[in-house]
Image: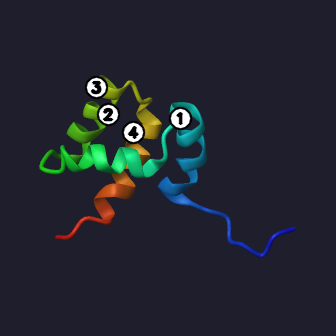
Amino acid sequence: MTDEPKVKGPASYFPSIEKTYGKPVAHWFKILDSAKDKKHMEQVAFLKTEHKIGHGHANALVSYYRVRQPA
């Protein structure tokens, strides 16, 4: 058993995202940089339509990304 805390929230999707799409999450964050002026759901739609990412994965990436952006 490990002493590491269980990952919760949007980051809990990251291993599945990396396995499913074959790219590290940092790749998707760089892509989101090009859409940083869009609203949350517009960013989700961008990932879904332009990059064929599923809704749950796109939402997790956008949620995590947006929290880490400067105000």
The residue identified by callout 1 is: 22
Q: Residue at x 57, y 53 (%)?
A: 12
The residue identified by callout 4 is: 58
The residues bearing labels 3 and 1 have C-alpha atoms spaced at a distance of 16 Å
User: Residue 49's image quarter?
Assistant: top left
**Upstream in the sequence, badge 2 or badge 4?**
2
Q: Could you tell me residue 17's position as x and y percent?
A: 53, 40
4 above or below 65?
A: below
Quadrant position of the C terminus in the picture = bottom left
Is 53 left, or right, of 38 in this rendering?
Answer: right
Q: Which residue type carries mark 2?
A: Leu
Do the residues under discs 1 and 2 have CB atoms within 8 angstroms?
no
Q: Residue at x 48, y 54 (%)?
A: 10
Do the residues under discs 3 and 2 have CB atoms within 8 angstroms?
yes
The residues bearing labels 4 and 1 have C-alpha atoms spaced at a distance of 14 Å
Q: Could you tell me residue 65's position as x and y percent?
A: 33, 56
